[in-house]
Amino acid sequence: MKKYINDISKVALSLLLGGLILYWMYRDFNFDDIMRVMCNDVNWTWMLLSFPFGILAQAFRGWRWNLSLRPLGERPRYSTSVNAVFLSYALSLVIPRIGEFARCGVLRRYDGVSFPKALGTVVTERAIDSLLVALIAATTFLWQIRVFNDFFAHTGTSIEGILRGFSVAGYIVTAVCGVAVLLMLWYLLRRFAIYNKVKATVGSIWQGVMSLRIVQNKGLFIAYTLGIWLSYFLHYYLTFFCFESTAHLGLSCALVTFVVGSIAVIVPTPNGAGPWHFAVKTMLILYGVHDTDALYFVLIVHTVQTFLVVLLGVYAWMALSFTHKQVGANEAVAEQ
């Protein structure tokens, strides 16, 4: 009973967090203008051109997952793997992260794949994706560090200016407060077991990288991984050309906002709703986009792309309804 209460609390907290962030961002927003912008100001041709890349990203993920299961003696059908991924993303809109378990359950039900093995490969995939995002984020930050410096200079909040305003006593007080905050965070992390979760996450990333040794076709696995993230990026980047306020920003801005948004969705809210909006909107403003235009962009783009996820989930559910169930891996091989 306690476990169910904890699970419900986590879901409620994630929904509340996303809702509060969205409310804070759009509390004074005139939603009557949204329809006007969508009907008159959005170039829907570019939005439609972005859709194939959103579909392809999830398809690549399904193909890569299928490849990672084969060294473990499991051979699900490619169609089942892809449909399981489609359905998992749609289900995660309702309950964050539930899709990871659901797609393993789909393979178990339709192709007789071992649930623990399937879940283990999902953890491995996420670990590898986390490492790749970290590398892209570090590279992007170093490449675009000038943008952050320019922002501080234009707003009069340069680090040098702040430090010059401190007295000796100010430095001491700031240092004491900083240490106190760090100690409090350390206590809270250990108190709520987040510290151990972070350690476990770092450990799983390393284990995931090491598990690549058993993948039979490493080149294809890497190609699928790069295909996933290139497709995600193009799915996002093409939406820049849908709006006059972002069409001129270029590849560097798209990459920076894409990376920041990818990191923001780590917060467990449905499809990153709330954290993604705030992170991308903030970075667009940093690149000179007006506050209102940035709000239009994140709201419309996120809503449309979420609608695509729902459509893919409905398609997968219908396709799986007509899929013949298989008991074991050998039968799956025979059918393939």
Image (cartoon, grey):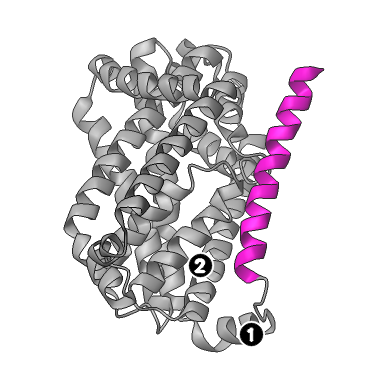
The amino acid sitting under disc 2 is: Val
Q: From the top left corner, tell me how far across and down residue 316 is, in percent.
A: 59, 42
Residue 273 as seen in the image, left or right of residue 205: right
Three-letter amino acid code of the residue under disc 1: Asp
Asked whether, in this view, residue 231 is left or right of residue 98, the answer is left
Q: Give the magenta range.
A: 1-26
Residue for point 41% across, 70% down: 239
Q: Main secondary structure of the magenta part?
A: helix
Q: In which quarter of the image is the N terminus?
A: top right
Q: Which residue is more in the foreground, 94 or 276?
A: 276
Q: Does 295 appear above or below 76?
A: below
Residue matched to label 1: 33
Up the image or down, 281 lies above or below 323; here it is below
Total marks drawn?
A: 2
Image quadrant of residue 91? top right
- Residue at which label 2 appears: 298
